Amino acid sequence: MITTTLFPGRYVQGRGALARLGKELARLGSRHLVICSPHPLEHLLPQVLPDVQQGGAVRVERFGGECTDQEIDRLSEAARDFQANTVTAFGGGKTLDAAKAVAVRAGVPVIVVPTIASTDAPCSSVCVIYSPDGVFERVDLLPRNPDIVLVDTEVIAAAPARFLVAGMGDALATWFEAESCRIGRGRNISGEAGSMTAHALARLCYETIRDWGLSARTACEAGVVTPALERVVEANTLLSGLGFESGGLGAAHSIHNGLTILPGARGLYHGEKVAFGVLASLFLADTFATLVDEVYDLCAVLGLPTSFADLGLDGVSGRDLRRVAEKACAPGESIHNEPGDISPDVVHAALVAADAEGRRRKVATAQGEAALRARRRDSRERA
């Protein structure tokens, strides 16, 4: 059996790492196309642009918001017109994916600078294509991984904590999906078996989120960089990226793709929908109750969705859930890496069960809190 492990060319992370961008770009070329999401275009790029311009000519393009075929075509034309010999992206996962595709078309190195730690897109050779309306269409597998991934944790800490939490939702899936591939002999992104390294990193990814996630969220809410934040940013970005790409994907990401067809869920981030996919995947197999408890408790404490209502789908119809299940089970979807029998009926049942468990826990928590308040009131009255 041949295994394959995929890595970015260089991964740089830490407080103030952005100061190294000009130096890194200078060794790769002298004509730099920079693709920016709107927020970093206005608030971050002006700080680093002078250093980049010292190393060569620069053209800046504003990202259009969705990683579509049309947007990639537009940016590729800009790269050709400018005769760029590097492509750099500032922003979230869709911006980075588009830049990776543009760099491949242009045949030049790509440098990705995530400004939020909301997905594991930065390190991967995967480009997820959406419709202009934000509906998942397909995954393109690019011929190489990014040449440089540069993560400034001060920038990450300055972003809303919800982005970091969404990244933890995405990272949460890494071990569960890689483990499904290992058990079911599913293939990774390269089409081959995952390596021992990939599975070990996927497990470490889950353990890091479990043990340090809440502390990292607290640090991000305070806008500060702490060791816990550094750990979780690395888990969200590097460990999850290596783990999903080299270990393989499973049900959670397919369920995410299914959820994108429902307008009510489109206001959620990728990792938030993936996290609910993890919960649903627990009901596709005979998962031990202790692990179910651990994952639901972790999602609840981090603020990740545990019910349809949390997804913006309160009152969702059985017909719409059936559509989600059918899209999740489409030919070529990663859910078919799961070791058990997979069908729309099975996935529909798992979705309903995951929501029911989430609602049950919310009721139990509310009842427990009400009982505690009642006991405190009785104590005061007796006193």
Image: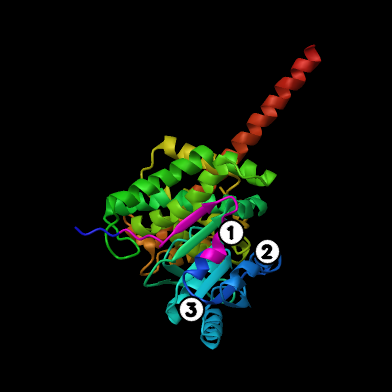
Q: Amino acid at mark 1?
A: Leu
Q: What number of labels is visible?
A: 3
Q: Which residue is mark 1?
A: 18
Q: Which residue is mark 2?
A: 47
Residue 303 drawn at (x, y percent): 61, 46
- Residue placed most toward the observer, 74 or 357: 74
Q: Amino acid at mark 3?
A: Asn
Residue 63 drawn at (x, y percent): 61, 74
Residue at position x 63%, y 57% from top? 312
Q: Amino acid at mark 2?
A: Gln
Q: What is the spatial separation of the Cα atoms under label 1 and label 2, in whole angstroms?
A: 10 Å
Q: Which residues are magenta?
A: 5-23
Q: What is the spatial separation of the Cα atoms under label 3 and label 2, in whole angstroms?
A: 22 Å
Q: Few, some or many C-alpha atoms within 10 Å of disc 2 (few <14, some 14-19, many ≥20)?
A: few
Q: Earlier in the sequence, mark 3 or mark 2?
A: 2
The label shown at residue 85 is 3
The label shown at residue 248 is none
Give the residue at the far left of this rendering.
Answer: 1
Q: Is residue 6 magenta?
A: yes
Is residue 347 shown above or below 288?
below
Is residue 365 shown above or below 334?
above
Residue 344 drawn at (x, y percent): 41, 62
Q: What is the spatial separation of the Cα atoms under label 3 and label 1, in whole angstroms?
A: 20 Å
Residue 342 in sight in this render: no
Residue at position x 57%, y 44% from top? 229
Q: Earlier in the sequence, mark 1 or mark 2?
A: 1
